Amino acid sequence: MFADIILPLAVPTCYTYSVPDAMIHTIKVGMLVNVPLGKSRHYNGIVLKIHSECKVGINYKPIEKMVLPQPILTENQIHLWQWIAEYYMCKLGDVLKAAIPTALYNAEYKPQSEAWLRLATDEWSKLFGNRKPTDKQKTLLDRLSESNISMAEAQSLVSVAVISGLIKKGAVERYYVDKSRFSYSAPLTELHKLSDAQQIAYNSVSSFFAKDHKPVLLHGITSSGKTEIYVKLIDNVVKNGGQVLYLVPEIALTTQLTERLRAFFGDKMLVYHSKLNEQERAEVYKDILDGSKYSIVLGVRSAVFLPFKNLKLVVVDEQHDASYKQQEPAPRYNAVNCAIMLASMYKANTLLGSATPSIEGYYNAVSGKWHLVELNKRFKDIEPPETIVVDMRAERSKRKVTSMFSWILRDKIIEAVSAGEQVILFHNRRGYSSQVHCEACGWVPMCDSCSVSMTYHKGSNSLECHYCGKRLPMPQKCPVCGGEISAYGYGTEQVESVIHDFLPDARVLRLDLDTTKGKNSYKNILEKFARHEADILLGTQMVSKGLDFEGVSLVGIINADTLLDYPDFRSTEFSYQTLLQVSGRSGRAHKRGEVVFQSSHVEYPIVGQIITSDYKGFYKEQIEVRRLFSYPPFSRVIFISLKSRNINAVQGASKLLVSYLSEQLKGMVLGPEIPPISKIREYNIRRIMVKIPVANSVSAAKIAVIQAIERMNRKYSMVSTIIDVDPI
């Protein structure tokens, strides 16, 4: 008997091992085993297949041992892994590293335990002889005569010294029980009654679910109450014994949703995201694998890898969000596509929700590949926010701008905070100043590992590269000519400083990558804002993603141009989604909100589409552009990035690869191009786009790509390639 084993290596195939006689009756597909590789290395790997096929003349090494007694992968998971490896052109070993929590893979998972006490003997009085137990000892012994208690409860009754004395005497013994790291206990609340509009949308979704298993796109405007529809659908599944996967794009959203969902579902829900430590991630995985009481998983993209047993519903909130796409490292998968595939494997239903669906997603819905349900009415008839567009060029010419704030936005902030209301400010740049330079000679500090200028962070008085993380102390004078150094451009750190200039007593919370590095940092910031312990929440894209705060009456978009001017075929779509989503954070409760939209390009058509929430007008315009230039959904795109420290090698390799690709994929190859950031971590980068028309075979194109790369590697082995299918 032989077994094919998936190892955590980026190799094109699995390795085959012989199965020792002692394991023949116990080994199963999905098990974690330890195997030798080469002369001295050993790896844990997953059993993919058990068979009797072998090649003559090969001496197959035996499996060393079974690491865990039961499989840690289900049949559907294996199928999903294989689909991901094939579709996203990566290796099964890449998927393994992304899917299995490290503590479980390394067999280092340890259940959390809790100390308890029990009587060591029913005849404890004999242990005291003629001496009677003290009053404190008698208190604990009498309590233990009724039932065992936790050490924590015992310490609420008596001191540790009393407990230790009784253990030493042999009257009481300590033992340990496993305790969940995710225990939750609170009274449950009834589900909210749906509004008429929500009920109509819910009925439509339910009827589509009953009809077939095609995904349903719920296109609901901001503040329309999509979450309440999700909750009712989830409740139906849970009552019938099924499992639900509820995906959100950002940890910030799990933080807000956790309390809302637990109010309805209590301890039936688990949360899964990257801020959990490895023991916590392993416990979630193991609890789902064991088929425990948990029915709902709320998680970010990696939650698609969990070992569901009875999955009946997948909900993907904010379907459009780019955070669902894994960028680095491989597998570069899109969790939305994986969730749809996962649901199909379980014959489960899929609901995708968004106020600003992706162009491809909405095209799938209107063309009939998915079902479409529209929800165009705000919950409780809350009016959409009033949007004030500020032409920053005109305001600067009239000298009505203070730093990055127009007087209009500044006054609106002061007015809202003075009235006890809250403000969300969006600016898509972190740090203090995006660039510094010498006034005399023009010197700009560049990262010596990346082709980008370094960002000034005032808090640490340092220059930082946002690509490789390198930090340098901020120089006092220009290192080239000794001239004065000035900073220009601004990030969230500087915006916060300016706010305190005109509102010294304002309580400001900043939500960006610099303030959310700790485990509970997201949660702490959002909970403080929700408790109205701050007046202003200032942040990058994180503040645009479906957050819901009742006290917010004003949203300020400080500089929309940071999004509008980005060079990419998806940039207009991304700008529309982000800016409309952040606008929707305003006026979600007792009063109509306001949005102040600052831009130097107010004449762009997208600005009007954002302020009128005209998604259909935006979609109609963009789909025609996509059709004209044959971009998705009218083609499938594959990016190939080539990297090398040797710039001549990467240039030569990229040109050679284009020539090989063009032989098989005539008219589909663009490049090589020098990307905007052409060097990262000392590696020079060139990029090639393969654009495959929908009428052509994607599988054949992928085979051609792999063959071309293999040919190129024969001459340029020092150049590495990265394949990104369906890039975002």
Image: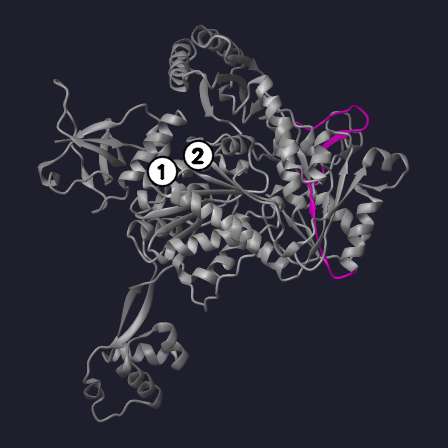
Say how the picture is coloured: one colour
The residue singled out by tag 1 in the image is 344
Q: Which residue is mark 2?
A: 337
Q: Closest to the observer: 137 or 276?
A: 276
Give percent across and percent down for residue 642. 49, 18
Above or below — where is 15 with respect to 389?
A: above
Q: Position of residue 492 (x, y in %)?
A: 69, 43
Q: Residues within 10 Å of mark 2 (few under 14, many from 20)?
A: few
> Which residues make up the magenta segment?
419-447
Identity of the amino acid at label 2? Asn
Residue 692 position, x and y percent, is 48, 17
Residue at image x 32%, y 23%? 12
Q: Is 431 contained in the magenta span? A: yes
Q: Between label 1 and label 2, give the one nearer the viewer.
A: 1
Q: Is residue 701 left or right of residue 641?
A: left
Asked whether the beta carbons under mark 1 and mark 2 sit within 8 Å of each other, the answer is: no
